[in-house]
């Protein structure tokens, strides 16, 4: 999650300093889930349950390990992280999302702000083609970078930010690929999008939305995963919550689908407090989904809130709440399953 300076009329805020404010939670309409008919109700949980705590933990200890050197944009550790993602997709048989088959969408150094000294980097794209509506694409995203090392060589591992979202995305892709192998693949296409440069200013998602491999007009939604492995101070004893941001900003349908999937299969505490208009922390604008929302693509941002280890060397894999990470990952998978398989794409009614 990117730190920002707020506009002059707001108090300066970072993710480690949150303004508390009571807000009204939007009230979703509980609707029929068109994809989760009797047959699909049996199919979806089977693949959802392949997302396990053990696999998430195993991958996160690698991805947020010291070898990745904090995954600073354009640096060798980030390059190793990108190669890890590419090689995982190859190993499970999920094809490249780029036309050249490399899995890499290069973000040139010239794209970053002038005098930033940032080196060229890459987004990592993997793709499952839809069986019935392949031209309609659901994007599921997470940022692959973090903030590197300090001058003394201490590694900022970024286990929660955003190692948690990254390994969640890998496991969601693996679950969908197992469905494909069983002849139960998604009707719409799914792009698994790992973006770079988020910590430097949402650059990877900005580059993708300015240079989309798949037309934004055909992109039905972006489910963005940024920090889903921890509890924040307001939920220290609540091991079944997640913040949802943006779900109702552009599409009433998306908001309702999300709520109904949760009600039917999880009954988690969906906390909407950071979704309010004029919310002072401005989280809606601070992760990669926003570059899709600016282009009228409906979004949901999944987030656990901040904690004492945010952007510190203490954000390590041993601090992750793995049962909760697993629950959240499964919720996102189930929501993606419905969006990818329902009869009609969600309608943009608030652009």
Image (cartoon, rainbow, N blue to C red):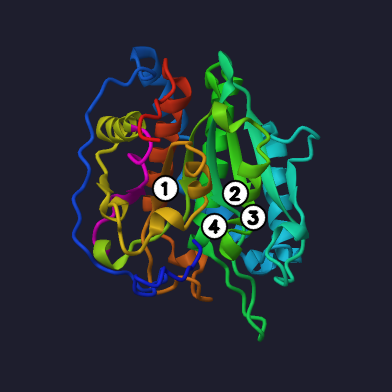
Q: Which residue is mark 1?
A: 301
The vertical placement of 333 against 122, above or below, is above
Residue 223 placed where, x, y %? 47, 40
Tell me the CA gap for discs 4 and 2: 17 Å
Is there a contact, CB below 8 Å, between mark 4 and mark 1? Answer: no
Q: Is residue 154 left or right of residue 252?
A: right
Per the image, label 3 sits on a secondary structure element best described as loop
Kindly tell me whether residue 324 is visible in this rendering.
yes
Q: Residue at x 39, y 28 (%)?
A: 45
Residue 250: say if magenta. Answer: yes
Kindly tell me whether residue 227 is visible in this rendering.
no
Depth check, mark 4 against mark 2: the one in front is 2
Residue 10 placed where, x, y %? 34, 70
Depth check, mark 3 against mark 4: the one in front is 3
Is there a contact, CB below 8 Å, between mark 1 and mark 2? Answer: no
Q: Give the mark nearer the N terminus: 1 vs 2.
A: 2
Residue 104 placed where, x, y %? 74, 45
How dense is the environment of label 4, judged by Cα within 10 Å: few (below 14), some, or many (20 and up)? many
Residue 66 got which mark?
none
Tell me the CA gap for discs 1 and 3: 17 Å
Residue 163 got which mark?
4
Q: Residue at x 50, y 72 (%)?
A: 311
Depth check, mark 2 against mark 3: the one in front is 2
Q: Which segment is the magenta one?
A: 236-251
Query: Seen from this angle, which residue lies furthest bottom?
Result: 152
Per the image, label 4 sits on a secondary structure element best described as helix
Q: Residue at x 32, y 35 (%)?
A: 255
């Amino acid at each position: 999650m990117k730190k920002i300076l707020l506009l002059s009329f707001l108090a300066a805020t970072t993710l480690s300093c949150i303004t508390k404010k009571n807000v009204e939670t939007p009230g979703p309409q509980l609707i029929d889930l068109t994809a989760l008919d009797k047959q699909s109700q049996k199919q979806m949980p089977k693949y959802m349950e392949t997302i396990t705590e053990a696999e998430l933990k195993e991958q996160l200890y690698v991805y947020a390990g010291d070898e990745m050197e904090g995954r600073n944009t354009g640096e060798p550790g980030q390059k190793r992280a990108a190669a890890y993602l590419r090689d995982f997709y190859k190993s499970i048989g999920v094809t490249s999302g780029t036309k050249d088959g490399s899995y890499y969408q290069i973000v040139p150094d010239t794209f970053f702000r002038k005098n930033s000294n940032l080196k060229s980097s890459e987004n990592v794209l993997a793709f499952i083609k839809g069986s019935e509506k392949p031209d309609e694409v659901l994007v599921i995203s997470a940022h692959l970078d973090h903030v590197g090392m300090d001058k003394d060589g201490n590694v900022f591992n970024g286990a929660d930010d955003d190692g948690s979202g990254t390994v969640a995305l890998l496991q969601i892709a693996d679950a969908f690929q197992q469905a494909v192998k069983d002849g139960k693949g998604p009707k719409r296409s799914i792009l698994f999008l790992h973006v770079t440069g988020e910590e430097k200013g949402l650059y990877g998602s900005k580059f993708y939305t300015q240079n989309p491999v798949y037309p934004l007009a055909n992109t039905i939604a972006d489910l963005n995963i940024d920090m889903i492995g921890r509890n924040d101070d307001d939920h220290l004893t609540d091991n079944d919550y997640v913040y949802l941001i943006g779900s109702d900003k552009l599409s009433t349908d998306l908001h309702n689908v999300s709520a109904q999937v949760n009600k039917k299969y999880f009954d988690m505490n969906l906390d909407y407090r950071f979704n309010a208009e004029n919310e002072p922390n401005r989280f809606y604008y601070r992760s990669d989904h926003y570059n899709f929302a600016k282009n009228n693509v409906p979004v949901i941002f999944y987030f656990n809130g901040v904690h004492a280890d945010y952007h510190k060397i203490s954000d390590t894999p041993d601090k992750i709440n793995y049962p909760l990470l697993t629950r959240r990952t499964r919720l996102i998978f189930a929501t993606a399953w419905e969006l990818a398989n329902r009869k009609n794409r969600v309608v943009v009614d608030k652009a």
